[in-house]
Structure formats: structure tokens, C-alpha cells
Image (cartoon, grey):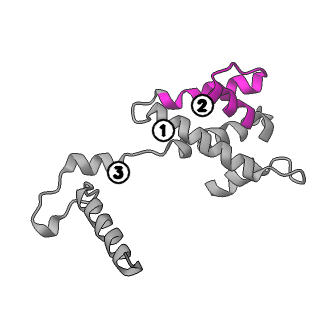
Amino acid sequence: MGKKSLLKAKLKAADKRRKRRPSTVPQQAMGERADTKELEQTSTRINPMDLIASTILKHVNQPESSARDVVVISTMKRILRGSSPVSPEEVVLSEKLSKIPERADIDQRKYRKGLEDILEIAGQQQSSSTPDAFLQYLTILSQ
């Protein structure tokens, strides 16, 4: 099989997959009726990563909070492992973060995936020259 025929076969297979996939946007131009329930579901989807990041920032920006990168990262790791927080600062943050999956619109699996993704970002943002680089990164993203 030459390169051209192999490419054609891959493109054809991709087109078939796309046709089988349900459309996220209703096709009103083709005469189909827009399903309002589907539109409501797509507009109310909430990203757990956004909720986690905003909860962390709200906690860190409180005057009585002295949370640093280390506290935030260790708290998220403890939540993923299922272990208990050690310091009082971790306990407070852990309680706030554990309220997120209790919401009706958040799936536990997506919440854990969001925590893992944020921990991955935190690992990329850590540096010895800037002690709170991860929190600064979250602050910049939130603006």
C-alpha cells in the first residue's frame, strides 16, 4: 500500500468516526429541532479544575491564611491518596476542596482528574528561585 492510499484510508476512517459521533451543536439548518435540554446541559457543564483553582485562590487570599505552594500541593496529594491532612492549614483547605465533588454537577472521576491535572501543573511551576510560583501562576490565570 502506497502512502497515498494509506492516507486516504485513514481519512475515510476518521470521517466515519466523525459521522458516528453525536453532534454537540444542533443542526438547525438541516431542519432538525433544537433540543433545549441538550443546550442547557452543554451550557451548564462545569470544569472541576476551575472550581479547584478558584477554591485554592479564595483560601490563599484570606487574611488568616498562610498557605504556600507546599501546603496546597501536599493537601491535594493527600486528597488523592485518601489520607488525613496534618497541619491545621491543610485541614481547612482539605475541607473546602472536599466540598467540590459533593456538588450535583461534578463527577467524582472528573474531580480526581482535575486534581491530578492541577498537581501536574504545580510540578511544572515549582522553582527554587520563586517559592510560591504555583500560586502566582494561578493568580495570573484567574485575572
* Distance CA(mark 1)–CA(mark 3): 17 Å
**Which residue ends up furthest to the front in the rendered image?**
1
What secondary structure is marked by label 3? helix
Q: Quadrant location of the N terminus?
A: bottom left
Quadrant of residue 13 within the rendered picture: bottom left
The residue at 81%/47% (across/down) is 132
Q: Closer to the camera: disc 2 or disc 1?
A: 1
Query: Which amino acid, by three-letter code, is at mark 1?
Result: Lys
* Distance CA(mark 3)–CA(mark 2): 24 Å
Whether tag 2 and tag 1 are in contact, CB under 8 A, the answer is no
Choose the circle earlier in sequence order: 2 or 1: 2
Q: Which residue was labeled with disc 3?
A: 43
Question: Picture coordinates of residue 20 (x, y %)?
Answer: 24, 56
Query: Which amino acid, by three-letter code, is at mark 2?
Result: Leu
Task: Tell me if 78 is positioned left or right of 52 in this view.
Answer: right
Q: Which residue was labeled with disc 2?
A: 97
Quadrant of residue 6 within the rendered picture: bottom left
Query: Which amino acid, by three-letter code, is at mark 3?
Result: Ser
Q: Which residues are magenta?
A: 73-101
Q: 61 or 124: nearer the eye?
A: 124
Question: Picture coordinates of residue 34 (x, y %)?
Answer: 17, 56
Question: Picture coordinates of residue 90 (x, y %)?
Answer: 73, 26
Task: Tell me if 111 is positioned left or right of 54 in this view.
Answer: left
Q: Which residue was labeled with disc 1?
A: 110
Whether residue 62 is visible here, answered yes or no, is no
